[in-house]
Image (tube, grey):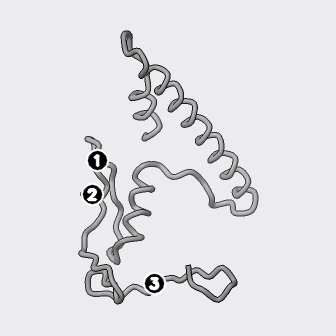
Amino acid sequence: MIATRVRRRCSTSPGSGGAVDERTALSRELGHFQKSVAEIVDILAGVFPEVGALDDDQTLSYLHSTISTHRHPVRAPEIPMYLDALLPDMPFAPGEVPMLGDHFPRPAVLRDGSGRGR
């Protein structure tokens, strides 16, 4: 899983000097993040029984579904790679009239109550 890979990268090695402090801080931040996510999942699971943590494949499949109209599972690669090379399977044209492949997605405008879009 991703957390295992991050921990492996954050492990200390002899003679790394200042990098040890940075790795310790990163490891501590990762632990805090994981604890916060687990607490949120526990709270939501009390209301929505189907709530649960996603594994790498499920996360990538969800992210793919947000930028494509093709619905299919996405598997995490054996060798880590940039997500922009893995997830898209159709062109995206931003602008006043955005296009995703042959589709025109509707942009969402969030308002803050003042009448102005954000």
Q: Nearer the viewer, mark 3 or mark 1?
A: 3
In this rendering, position of residue 109 left or right of residue 12: right
Of labels 3 and 2, earlier in sequence is 2
Of labels 3 and 1, earlier in sequence is 1
| Residue 14, horizontal then vertical, whole percent | 38, 10
Q: Which residue is mark 2?
A: 86
In this rendering, position of residue 36 left or right of residue 13: right
In this rendering, position of residue 89 left or right of residue 43: left
Q: Residues within 10 Å of mark 2 (few under 14, many from 20)?
A: some
> Marks 2 and 1: in contact by CB < 8 Å?
yes
Label 1 – label 2 distance at C-alpha: 9 Å
| Residue 63, horizontal then vertical, whole percent | 41, 63
Q: Secondary structure at mark 1?
A: loop
Q: Residues within 10 Å of mark 1 (few under 14, many from 20)?
A: few
In this rendering, position of residue 69 left or right of residue 44: left
Q: Residue 96 or 56: which is nearer the viewer?
A: 96
Quadrant (top left, top right, bottom left, bottom right) of the N terminus: top left
Label 3 – label 1 distance at C-alpha: 31 Å
Q: Quadrant of residue 30?
A: top right
Numbered tag placed on residue 107 in the rendering = 3
Residue at 27% over, 47% down: 81
Residue at 39% over, 29% down: 9
Q: Quadrant of residue 15?
A: top left
> Marks 2 and 3: in contact by CB < 8 Å?
no
Query: Vertically, is 53 above or below 112?
Result: above
Query: Vertically, is 93 above or below 5?
Result: below
Q: Secondary structure at mark 3?
A: loop
> In the image, what residue type sits under mark 2?
Leu
Q: Which residue is mark 1?
A: 77
Q: Secondary structure at mark 2?
A: helix
Q: Quadrant of residue 92?
A: bottom left
Residue at 27% over, 42% down: 78
